[in-house]
Image: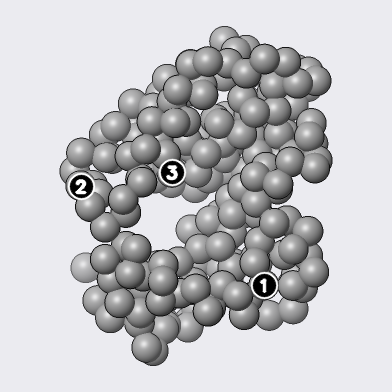
Amino acid sequence: MHVSTCLFIALSLLSAALPANAQNAELAAIHDADQAARSTPAEIDWTVLLPEDRRRRERVQELLSAGEARAAIDYYHAAMVFQHGENLDDFRLAHALSTIAMSLEPEEKQYRWLTAASWDRIMATQLQPQWYGTQFHSDDKGMFLYPVADGVVSDEDRKAMQVPTLAETRARLEELAKMNGQTVNPDPPTIEELRRARQAWSKD
């Protein structure tokens, strides 16, 4: 799906958004399946999960196109499924959907967090420093916090979006790595090193 299609759908959804009603049961079930598949990160079989994720996104796209998302929680559920997508278009749609959810219910913490996390994923996918510090990557040396842009947002901004401070996030890195069956990379790459690695990979 092209970027323009994603943005058109997102804008159409925003214009059609209504105050919270009862949640869509199928979107809730798809979201719950997405989360259950990730309940034990170290045991994920990606050869199984990736096709399942694609089928979930396809069905969510059908439900969105049919206007089945009405409540803020519906947009959040759809956003989380696309947050676990595979490309920039998926992540842009996740961000648009989570932003709709947050605009409908600004005080809902999980909507605010996903809006920040989807923005970070958009930035990381484009090899730009993330803003909030929600994204972690791994290489052959272990897990690391993806580079964070200096001074773009403050820790107060992070708290407002229900994201831990950078110090709190860094303190949890070892715990998160262990949950994923990994170790911590003691010498995490800079954004410049990541860009050079991508360029080298593209030439192979």
Left or right: residue 151 versus residue 204 is right
- Nearest to the observer: residue 128 or residue 46: 46
User: Could you tell me the amino acid type at mark 2?
Assistant: Asp
| Residue 60 horizontal/vertical position (percent) | 48, 23
User: Could you tell me the amino acid type at mark 3?
Assistant: His
How many other residues sit within 10 Å of disc 3, few (<14), some (14-19) or many (≥20)? some
- Nearest to the observer: residue 3 or residue 100: 100
Q: Secondary structure at mark 3?
A: loop
Residue where numbered disc 2 is placed: 45
Coloring applied to the structure? one colour
Residue where numbered disc 3 is placed: 84
- Nearest to the observer: residue 90 or residue 200: 90
| Residue 106 horizontal/vertical position (percent) | 80, 40
Kindly identify the residue that appears in the image at 36 percent across and 46 percent down. Answer: 39
Q: Which mark lies nearer to you, 3 or 2?
A: 2
Kindly identify the residue that appears in the image at 68 percent across and 80 percent down. Answer: 150
In the image, is residue 89 above or below residue 151?
Answer: above
Left or right: residue 76 versus residue 191 is right
Residue where numbered disc 1 is placed: 165
